Amino acid sequence: MRAATHWRRFRSRLRGKLDDKTLYESDSLYARARQIAHDAYQSTRGRVRGKQQAIKRASMAAAMLRDRQTRTPEYLLARLLLLVPAAAAAQDEMDRHYGGYKNRKARLYELIDFNDTFVDTVLALPEEELTGFTQRLRTELNALCAKLRVDGFDDDQFDAIVHGLSREIAVYRGAKKEGYQVRMTSRVQDAKGVDMIITDPRTKKSIGVDVKTHSSFHFRLLKLQRRNLIDEQRRLECELAGFCTIRNTRRSEQPDTVLLRIATSRLGPIANYSFRKTDKLAALIAGALKNHGKYIV
């Protein structure tokens, strides 16, 4: 019986198609990533046809690349490509079932794995590769999903993911540029809403940050108010400050989370996943650390 979802080699099938840039970029980052992803996928085994089998094989191939612990840009990009089928399916399921549903935690981790690998890939890319990366990535993801005959992200989903992650990456890079110590969190902490830990090297105090876009920050505050976790005065104070602490009342060992509003209208434009100027971001972080910084072990 033939293996499910045969993945043809790119060159033989697409030769002559000028829209496939790998044909004339034979040694580009994207061509190397495609080949790594192709080889990893072909090394998996599957005997049942269909989307679910293709998603499973792609996830297995991504796990194989993760276990190799090779963090070069092409390996990270290859892993990112292979994570798309499962992440897109998880996003569709979460969009259809807002709130609790079966396997929600597993679907959440599939999205977190994709997001974390996206961040790792961007941070590993040479500066010259960042220009046009978002659009090229969209092309690569669509090409892979078409070959595997699975659904990928639609345009709205992809744009929303990139919109949020571009701000997270810009905060990470901007904070480091301003002299702060920054580390991305584990997938467990990420699932609890903490994207990164920012530490002031002078005071040694830290904040666990959940990066929010302008709109998501606003609506999160409204939700907290509806749940009586903050009152209206506190909500307005947070809106003015651009940050707000969510107190941890369940487990004392879990640090508080600081919601950090990243609004380009206030902090300046982001280009190639970096703020053009970081002085306003530095002031925002300094204010959050001054008001909510703690010693985090």
Image (cartoon, helix red, strand yellow):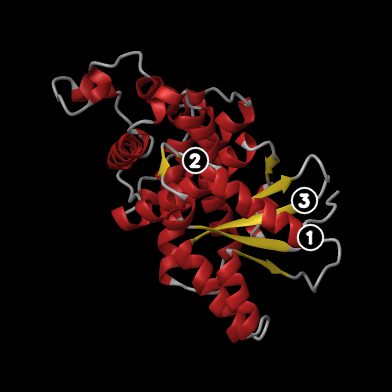
Residue, disc 3: 206
Give the Cα distance between marks 2 and 1. Answer: 30 Å
Say which residue appears at 73% left-offset and 55% top-offset.
289
Q: Is residue 227 visible?
A: no
Q: Amino acid at mark 2?
A: Lys
Q: Is residue 203 visible?
A: yes
The image quarter containing residue 106 is bottom right
Which percent across, then down, holds residue 32? 40, 19
Tell me the number on the disc at residue 277: 2
Residue, disc 1: 255
Q: Earlier in the sequence, mark 1 or mark 3?
A: 3
Q: Amino acid at mark 1?
A: Pro
Q: Nearer the viewer, mark 2 or mark 1?
A: 2
Q: Nearer the viewer, mark 1 or mark 3?
A: 3
Which class describes the residues within 10 Å of circle 3: few (<14), some (14-19), or many (20+)?
many
Say which residue appears at 45% left-offset and 67% top-offset.
215
The image quarter containing residue 70 is top right
Which percent across, then down, holds residue 121? 50, 33
Q: Dividing the image into 4 quarters, which one contains the N terminus?
A: top left
Q: Nearer the viewer, mark 2 or mark 3?
A: 2
Which class describes the residues within 10 Å of circle 2: few (<14), some (14-19), or many (20+)?
few
Identify the secondary structure beneath mark 2: loop
Give the Cα distance between marks 2 and 3. Answer: 23 Å
Asked whether, in this view, residue 138 is left or right of residue 74, the answer is left
Q: Earlier in the sequence, mark 2 or mark 3?
A: 3
Judged from this view, the residue extending furthest toward the top is 27
Residue 60 vertical placement versus 101 (above, below): above
